Amino acid sequence: MLRARTIEDAGTEPPGSSASSIVLQRTPEGFVGETRATGFTGSGAPCPVTFPTELVACEDAGLTLRAVASTSIDEGCQPSRSGPPPVRLKQVLLRDPPDAGP
């Protein structure tokens, strides 16, 4: 199982933001799983959301995932029937270069 977690710069978190996690499992079809995050309704109520996610490339520089970039949710924390359908996009997660030290 591969997990990645967002990390905020300078130890502060902007208002209304939330952490997300990517959980992938090795399957016969490759690494597949989901992104778990907090979405917000039109009125600002937080809702847990999950998006299908799959690994499409693994290189020295980082990983390329295919996942939903955004979606609409209704006031009941369900996918909105009136909003645009979710679109799955390729997203690149780059590895930080090693610290060169002092």
Image: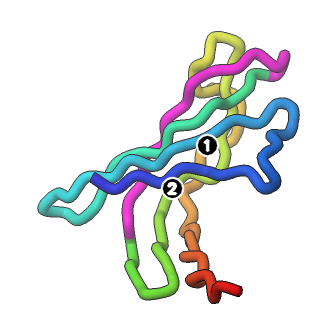
> Residue 51 colored magenta?
yes
Determine the secondary structure under disc 2. strand
* Residue 71 location (% of width, % of height): 65, 40
Tell me the amino acid under the disc marked 2: Ala
Is 48 situated left or right of 24 in this image?
Answer: right
Q: Are marks 1 and 2 in contact (CB under 8 Å)?
A: no
Element type at mark 1 = loop
Whichever of labels 1 and 2 marks the residue nearer the N terminus, that label is 2
Residue 92 x %, y %: 57, 72
- What mark, if any, has residue 96 been given in the picture? none
**Which residue shows up at 58% across the image and 36% down it?**
37
Residue at the location (17% across, 57% down)? Answer: 27
Question: What is the tally of numbered marks visible in this picture?
Answer: 2
Q: Which residue is mark 2?
A: 67
**Magenta stretch secondary structure, dominant:** strand
The residue that disc 1 covers is 85
